[in-house]
Amino acid sequence: MPTPDGMISRKTVLKAAAALGAAPLLVGGGVALARDQIGTGEPLALTPECHDGDAPTIEQTEGPYFKPNSPLRSSMVNDGPGTRLVVSGYVFGRACRPISGVLLDFWQADDGGNYDNSGYTFRGHQFTDANGAYKLDTIVPGLYPGRTRHIHVKLQAPGRSIVTTQLYFPGEPRNNTDTIYDARLLMNVRQNGSTREGSYDFVLNVAQTPGTPSPTPTPTSTSTGGPTTPPGGSWAAGTSYNAGDRVTYSGVSYTCLQAHTAMAGWEPPNVPALWQRS
Ligand SMILES: [Fe+2]
């Protein structure tokens, strides 16, 4: 499991630098990651506080271009122009334990700064793996009027509310003038050949006990991937659903909003991003 451990927290360093008037968060590649705080014993601040620790919990506007029903895919790359970008990281709970099965729904502008509002170009959702990791293959989003460079994302841990936020790129001139921009949402970005690699660790408001494995949800059945007994309805973990599919769960009818493979913890009442009462 690739989760780092015992690393020296950089938060204290950043705070000290800030006290001296430096601006460490604006330096490319100098952003602290939530994973750096593993082992410090203190609960992590929520996304996007995980880079700071003192700021109030904020989420960011979804803007005008979100649309549901994005395809399940970790690569949004197509044949169009653009600089390849790989964004990766982990989703942690408050004790910096990874959370598996977190839904991440990404959307962004294309190389020319345009959103696809009729289709699903540069839209896609995925789930964190058993290690709480995610990885998105995409391109560097283009600029459009009024905003700095950014990627939109909605996250939802099983049974939890949706967190809507955005990721930013270091060194962007418009970071200084975009009123939505927040340095706590800066990715670490480095160049690797012709590809840019961004990393960011999210922290969600999921209580955890430090030192104990705590991927949530606690499976209610063995996670062999096979269907389980329907819990009082037609919905079943292990089943692949498409947008528009209808199921019943505990006597209530739901319509699938996004294609996905159901899993324990993602029962329809728990995941409004996936199921709508019908
Ligand atoms: Fe946007």
Image (spheres, rainbow, N blue to C red):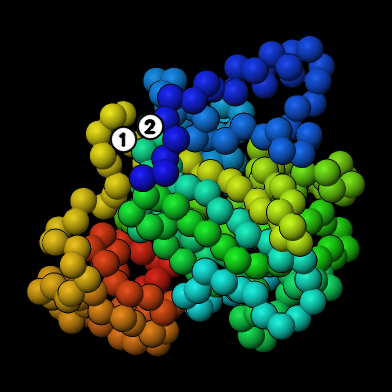
Q: Is residue 267 above or below residue 78?
A: above
Mark drawn on residue 263: none
What residue sits 37% from the left and 50% below the top?
Answer: 131
Tell me how far mark 1 sits from mark 2, CA to CA: 5 Å
Q: Quadrant of residue 261?
A: bottom left
Residue type, label 2: Ala
**Mark 1 / mark 2, whichever is N-terminal:** 2
Residue 278 x/y as whole percent: 34, 81
Residue 11 x/y as whole percent: 59, 23
Looking at the image, can residue 156 be seen? no
What residue sits 84% from the left and 48% below the top?
Answer: 172
Mark drawn on residue 95: 2
Q: Nearer the viewer, residue 16 or 4?
A: 4
Q: In which quarter of the image is residue 237?
A: bottom left
Residue 114 x/y as whole percent: 79, 74
Q: In this view, does 254 lie above or below 162?
A: below
What residue sits 66% from the left and 53% below the top?
Answer: 197
* Callout 1–callout 2 Cβ contact below 8 Å: yes
- For this view, does 242 lie left or right of residue 61? left
Q: How crowded is mark 1: few (under 14 residues within 10 Å), some or many (20 or more)?
A: many
Name the residue beneath numbered marker 1: 208
- For this view, does 261 lie left or right of residue 26? left
Q: Which of 200 and 179 is in front in this view?
A: 200
| Label 1 within 8 A of ligand 1 by Cβ | no
Q: Quadrant of residue 248?
A: bottom left
Q: Residues within 10 Å of mark 2 (few under 14, many from 20)?
A: many
Q: What element carries label 2?
A: loop
